[in-house]
């Protein structure tokens, strides 16, 4: 497991602290439905990484080994990669190694700035990155709202470091630390920090702007760690009023699979609809707001304020929310187990486990959207799992106690689920009686989410 995986307990600790701060300050920073969606996307991204990391890192390893400047010229010294600090026989600082790691970290952050900037300016890259921006809240859970597909496109931005000879283990560590740093800046609980910090470092204030859907805030403050890149390249704006969070065309769904693919679907439809091949090419590589003339006008972000903004928050009864929360916890622990054993199981078994976890999260999303038909796939999921557990137990593939416990859990879950039918039926009737506005968003309200 890597730095990010080991940081997961730390992430949940900070989310707990943020929740306590919100309670003490009588502020509502979380909605349970939105937070489950955020964490579901984080889980999906981590599971997808099991299968995509070879593609993302393979090219880097190959270039470092065969095409770095050190391989092309023996006169160029190897990049310092040893530990910057050791403790054997007392504290020792190795200046050459410290310099090598420092320069590598700065270069990783510089590459991240351009990766991030172009992920907002190029449609195909935005299709992957949009996942992170699709929440209409802004809290530490949103930091874990990550794409499962974006890494398939963005690894190329780090290849210059491979050509420069930055060892793969140094790059991987610096990249992970860069991402872990960005976790804490996703909060409304921290205001503006002292001026020297705001001048150099990316802070919650800077990053709130980046997540704003307000026209003056859009496509600004791309920094990962050092905000100086934005100031030097003209993409920085200060936070004035608090932003409205989300995306111009709201997602209006809790489904982690749809969140990952919805812009790709829209991109493909536009690609097919336009007639000229030049325009088809531009659909992929132009700005996400651009549209061919034969498809429609370019998208212009409307002015919006927190007083008039609307949030997606379908009405769901508390018993349904409690069921979804309990099942989400089970899926969370299952996903952590998959990540822990990923190096010891065959790929087909890992794929089956990952598929089941993602299926669970998708079913829970349907429940949180108040769909009355969600009972059918969810009951089927538990039935299949219960049968599989008993079969594996009978074959001796898993301990008999584990098989019985798994089947019992599924049976109890089905009974609990069936008890929710009237709540979901009422929610469906209510939804048909009060359809959402044409923009896909119900009015902003405290909604049905349990207060968290």
Image (tube, grey):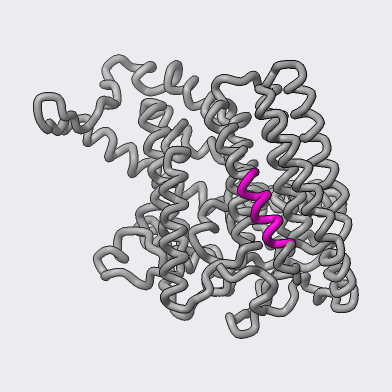
* Majority secondary structure in the magenta region: helix
The residues colored magenta run 320-330
Q: Residue furthest bottom?
A: 307
Residue at 45% over, 51% down:
11
Q: Which of 57 and 65 is in front in this view?
A: 57
Q: In which quarter of the image is the C terminus?
A: bottom right
Residue at 75% over, 68% down:
316
Quarter location, residue 251: bottom right
The answer to whether residue 444 is above or below residue 169 is below
- Is residue 439 in sight in this rendering? yes
- Is 77 a magenta residue? no
Residue at 30% over, 14% down:
74
Residue at 64% over, 77% down:
446
The reply, left or right, for residue 264 in relation to residue 98 is right
| Residue 173 image position (x, y, % from top left) | 38, 35
- Is residue 152 in sight in this rendering? no
| Residue 63 image position (x, y, % from top left) | 47, 22
The answer to whether residue 202 is above or below residue 440 is above
The answer to whether residue 91 is above or below residue 245 is above
| Residue 399 image position (x, y, % from top left) | 65, 22
Q: Which of 200 and 94 is in front in this view?
A: 94
| Residue 397 image position (x, y, % from top left) | 69, 18
- Is 323 a magenta residue? yes
Q: Nearer the viewer, residue 139 or 230?
A: 139
The reply, left or right, for residue 37 in relation to residue 261 is left
Q: How many labels does the image show?
A: 0
């Amino acid at each position: 497991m890597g730095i990010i995986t080991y940081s997961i307990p730390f992430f949940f600790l900070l989310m707990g602290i943020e929740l306590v701060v919100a309670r003490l300050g009588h502020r509502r920073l979380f909605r349970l439905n939105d937070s489950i969606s955020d964490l579901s996307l984080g889980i999906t991204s981590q599971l997808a990484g099991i299968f995509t990391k070879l593609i993302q890192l393979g090219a880097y390893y190959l270039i470092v080994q065969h095409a770095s400047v050190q391989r092309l010229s023996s006169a160029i010294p190897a990049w310092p990669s040893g530990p910057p600090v050791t403790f054997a026989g007392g504290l020792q600082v190795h200046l050459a190694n410290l310099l090598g790691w420092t320069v590598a970290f700065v270069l990783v952050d510089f590459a991240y700035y351009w990766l991030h900037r172009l992920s907002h300016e190029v449609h195909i890259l935005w299709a992957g990155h949009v996942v992170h921006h699709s929440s209409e809240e802004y809290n530490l859970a949103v930091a874990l709202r990550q794409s499962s597909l974006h890494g398939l496109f963005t690894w190329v931005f780090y290849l210059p470091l491979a050509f420069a000879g930055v060892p793969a283990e140094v790059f991987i560590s610096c990249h992970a630390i860069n991402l872990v740093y960005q976790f804490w800046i996703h909060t409304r609980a921290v205001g503006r920090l002292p001026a020297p910090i705001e001048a150099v470092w990316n802070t919650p204030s800077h990053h709130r702007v980046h997540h704003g859907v307000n026209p003056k805030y859009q496509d600004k403050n791309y920094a990962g760690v050092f905000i100086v890149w934005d100031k030097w390249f003209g993409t920085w704006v200060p936070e004035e009023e608090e932003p409205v969070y989300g995306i111009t065309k709201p997602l209006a769904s809790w489904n982690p699979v749809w969140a990952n693919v919805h812009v790709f679907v829209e991109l493909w439809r536009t690609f097919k609809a336009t007639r000229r091949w030049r325009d088809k090419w531009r659909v992929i590589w132009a700005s996400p707001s651009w549209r061919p003339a034969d498809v429609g006008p370019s998208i212009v972000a409307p002015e919006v304020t927190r007083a008039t903004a609307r949030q997606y928050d379908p009405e769901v009864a508390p018993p349904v929310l409690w069921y979804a929360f309990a099942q989400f916890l089970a899926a969370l622990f299952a996903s952590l187990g998959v990540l822990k054993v990923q190096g010891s199981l065959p790929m087909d078994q890992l794929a089956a486990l990952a598929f089941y976890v993602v299926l669970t999260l998708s079913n829970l999303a349907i429940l949180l959207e108040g769909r009355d038909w969600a009972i059918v796939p969810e009951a089927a999921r538990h039935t299949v799992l219960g049968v599989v557990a008993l079969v594996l137990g009978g074959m001796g593939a898993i301990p008999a106690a584990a098989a019985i416990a798994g089947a019992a859990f599924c049976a109890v879950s089905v009974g609990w689920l069936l008890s929710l039918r009237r709540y979901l039926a009422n929610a469906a009737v209510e939804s048909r009686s009060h359809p959402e506005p044409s923009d896909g968003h119900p009015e902003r309200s405290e909604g049905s989410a349990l207060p968290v």
